[in-house]
Amino acid sequence: MLPMFTFTPLKMTEETGAHGRIGICGAASNSDRAPQRSNKMTVAFPARRKRAFITGITGQDGSYLAELLLSKNYEVHGIKRRSSSFNTERVDHLISDWHERDVSFFLHFGDLSDASSLSKLLYRVAPDEIYHLGAQSHVRVSFDIPEYTGDITALGTTRLLDAIRETGIPTRFYNAASSEMFGQAYECPQTELTPFRPRSPYGCAKLYSYWMTVNAREGYGLYAVNGILFNHESPRRGEIFVSRKITRAVARILHGLQEKLYLGNLDGERDWGYAPEFVEGIWRMLQQDEPEDFLLATGETHSVREFVERAFSEVGLDWRRHVEVDPQYYRPTEIDRLEGDYSKARKKLGWTPSTRFRDLVKIMVEADVQLLEDKLSGQIERRMAMRGSE
Ligand code: NAP
Ligand code: GDD
């Protein structure tokens, strides 16, 4: 078992963040406040709210997970990287003025390459649950920057696990593993027992991270689990993953802003699910009595070509007139097909995805068309305003 040190969370120190309204602070919660006195002089202690710490909170999954945890009355802390431009777009709606009472959402500067920042934050926040989602998460990019990918995606996990040991906080740990670890898979569909055979620097980094998590569980008795998640998408998906690249292009082509969409391998087949449903599964993994690894997927596989066809036909366009293959998007090694069997998650977590492929594509196309139209109308307003000032 982990040694259990006593710890004293630091007092809150509030600073103005990049937007001038982000609380950068230590552990401040209802549980840290003085007990309330009733008029009968009995002392009522407020129930301790659960406190979560999320790496990768500014990403697709981190933003949905933060929303889910807030809806469950958690106090949510996350790290954001220092950047020369704003990088909190996906969570901006969760940020409130830290002068307000009952603030539940906190962002702290930190980086997975910086072990001391992780230790300090864990010591201050003392979270009950840690969701480790931060990573250099793009497979194609990992071939260009393999060393950096290893540093953040693999060693970042070691730094975080080490920070848990250093601080001695009693906590539960979730690691975002990936179906990319199956690579050119030995069997189809893949389960939690399928051997791994990664085909990218990203896949290798995730495999290292996976085993470090298993070792922390077996070696130190930490409640640590891996979620082996298959591709999951949403309107918040990063713009250079294939699903979002397609749906953004559909919106732009529809509005005459773009003529062609250049893609790589159209034959790759993926098991695509809907991200908000997957973060529910992630949360459930940390609520079990015993720590175990789980796979989340839909069990339904489609090719990139099918995604393209569906997305274009959603707005009445013929994809053949607009899509061209550009070999620069090919990968040195590709995974032909991924298909997951989520039976274990269904049985033990009671988790079942309900958004099917067709619905997912529709949700994403509609969201990107709406987003573009909102932007265009904003531009028109701006142009009109500028004309007025001329
Ligand atoms: P994402 O949108 O790319 O988000 C990645 C997050 O990691 C961002 O918040 C990013 O911060 C942060 N990050 C990157 N480098 C960092 C660093 N050096 N220090 C601290 N934070 C850093 O990824 P996602 O789709 O939400 O996926 C979440 C996790 O699940 C990732 O680990 C991914 O590899 C894994 N996964 C995803 C899928 C999927 O289909 N989405 C499937 C399996 C596994 P910035 O916002 O500043 O870039
Ligand atoms: N990104 C991208 N861009 N992919 C393309 C393109 C293109 O222009 N053209 C074709 N593809 C193909 C890729 O070769 C791959 O077969 C498929 O589209 C999906 O690519 P991505 O959307 O980049 O996702 P991924 O499967 O490589 O990785 C995602 O899923 C993993 C889980 O299996 C990421 O989210 C990883 O972080 C995640 O672990």
Image (cartoon, helix red, strand yellow):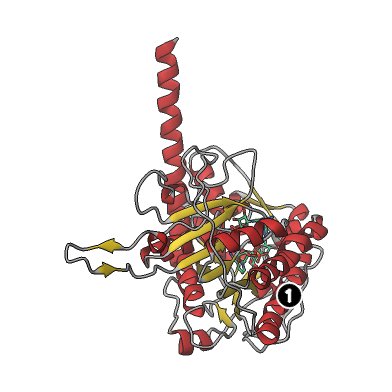
Single out the residue that lies furthest toward the front.
41
Report the front residue among 108 and 182.
Answer: 108
Q: Horizontal placement of 286 versus 303: left or right? A: left
The one nearer the camera, 23 or 335, is 23
Which secondary structure, mark 1?
Answer: helix
Q: Amino acid at mark 1?
A: Leu
Quadrant for the C terminus in the image: top left
Viewer-closest of 195 and 283: 283
Identify which residue, 310 or 278, lies in the foreground: 278
**Splitting the image into four quadrants, where does ligand 1 fall?**
bottom right
Q: 303 above or below 2?
A: above
Q: Percent from the top left, x then y, of residue 368? A: 47, 49
| Residue 54 shows in this picture | yes
Task: Look at the image and tell me in which quarter the N terminus lies.
Answer: bottom right
User: Is 109 placed above or below 294 here?
Assistant: above
Side of 169 relative to 213 (left or right): left
Q: Tell me which residue sits at (48%, 75%) in the image.
A: 281
Which residue in the protein does label 1 denote? Answer: 207
Work out whether residue 237 can be spotted. no
When asked about the image quadrant of residue 118, the answer is bottom right
Residue 239: x and y, percent?
59, 51
> Residue 346, image x and y in percent?
47, 86
Q: Dividing the picture into quarters, in which one does residue 204 lie?
A: bottom right
- Neighbor class of circle 1 (other Cα within 10 Å; few <14, some 14-19, many 20+) is many
